Amino acid sequence: MSCSSSKQQVATANLKINNPVIKDKYTGDPAALVYKDSVYLYAGHDVAPNDFNFYKMEEWLVYSSADLIHWKEHPVPLKTTDFKWAKGDAWAAQVIERNGKFYWYVTVSHATIPGKAIGIAVSDSPTGPFKDALGKALITNDMTKQVGIDWDDIDPTVFVDDDGQAYLYWGNQVCKYIKLKENMLEADGPINVVNLPNFTEAPWLHKHNDWYYLSYAYEFPEKIAYAMSKSPAGPWEYKGILNELAGNSNTNHQAIIDFKGKSYFIYHNGAIQPHGGSFRRSVCIDRLYYNPDGTMKRVVMTTEGIQE
Ligand code: FUB
């Protein structure tokens, strides 16, 4: 079903209420891709019943926009059942473009290796359809031993540096990264650990001007904090809190982009009432501002969101 701008926007006296950006479905774990003149917004589809207090997610959704206000929903591009080796849980994910192909790094539960795992889907279009690129997981729980939980291999974020080297960061409780080969499908070297204060999950790696930024969910319930570096491999210098508690959702999961000369902070909260909350989440977008020294100003979460 398509969401037209007229359905999505609610007029107030002077400003339109544009947050959450998707009002007819629950959407969590936003990731955004800037490609040509559009932003593609990818999110997990929260379908937990109102009396069910955990994640219920079996597919991801994709929306596109040329202005971050008017969004078009596309057909469902990817489901957990598209990974034959997985057994559900469409948790956090990110899409990146390389050489005209679109690679989608996803979290799912592995069917035979206990725990969460990271898989890769690929498409010729940012809106899909996507198909399993490997026929197996890239990362499984038995590859990482830093903590004794089975959900520590979640929330992939992927980034291709100016020199062509690709990086995949991920983790829960412990942040880890690998370099990826140019085919985007294989690790190029060992798994490395990054020490970040109060790291919970949801790393997002981005570059702005000549700085690299590693933002992440901090403590639980989650705020968003960040670190900066002159290299996508670190060392990372912790810079503090970027976004406060959402309040109505114990997770906040951010994506950060530059688009048409402005910077944006994309996140989720539990704003849709009466049943929205930690397991029925909604993607929101607000402006992000940098200081002259490259640090980021604290985000102001708004109801109005992005205006014309
Ligand atoms: O959506 C399931 C999990 O909740 C994600 O993987 C985490 O980042 C948190 O948002």
Image (cartoon, grey):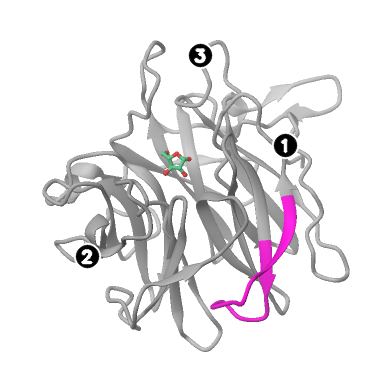
Task: State the residue position of label 1.
Answer: 305
Tell me the residue at 37%/65% (across/down).
102
Quarter-of-image position of residue 171: bottom left
Marks 2 and 3, how far apart at CA: 36 Å
Q: Out of 252 and 260, give the one closest to the viewer.
A: 252
Q: Position of residue 84 (x, y in %)?
A: 12, 50
Q: Out of 203 and 122, give the one closest to the viewer.
A: 203
Q: Amino acid at mark 1?
A: Gly
Q: Amino acid at mark 3?
A: His
**Mark 3 vs mark 1: which is more N-terminal?**
3
Q: Amino acid at mark 2?
A: Ala
**Mark 2 vs mark 3: which is more N-terminal?**
2
Query: Where 182 sits versus 279, above or below?
Result: below
Task: Tell me whether the residue at label 3 lies in contact with that at label 1, contact meaning CB atoms closer than 8 angstroms.
Answer: no
Q: Can the viewer see residue 241?
A: yes
Q: Is residue 143 left or right of residue 45?
A: left
Query: Magenta stretch?
Result: 227-241
- Label 2 CB sits under 8 Å from any ligand 1 atom: no
Marks 2 and 1, how far apart at CA: 36 Å
Mark toward the viewer: 2 or 3: 3
Tell me the residue at 36%/16% (across/down).
52
Marking on residue 275? 3
Is residue 230 magenta-colored?
A: yes
Circle 1: element type? loop
**Mark 2 vs mark 1: which is more N-terminal?**
2
Quarter-of-image position of residue 6: top right
Q: Residues within 10 Å of mark 2 (few under 14, many from 20)?
A: some
Task: Tell me whether the residue at label 2 lies in contact with that at label 3, contact meaning CB atoms closer than 8 angstroms.
Answer: no
**Residue placed farthest to the bottom in the image?**
163
Task: State the residue position of label 2.
Answer: 133
Q: Position of residue 128 (x, y in %)?
A: 32, 54
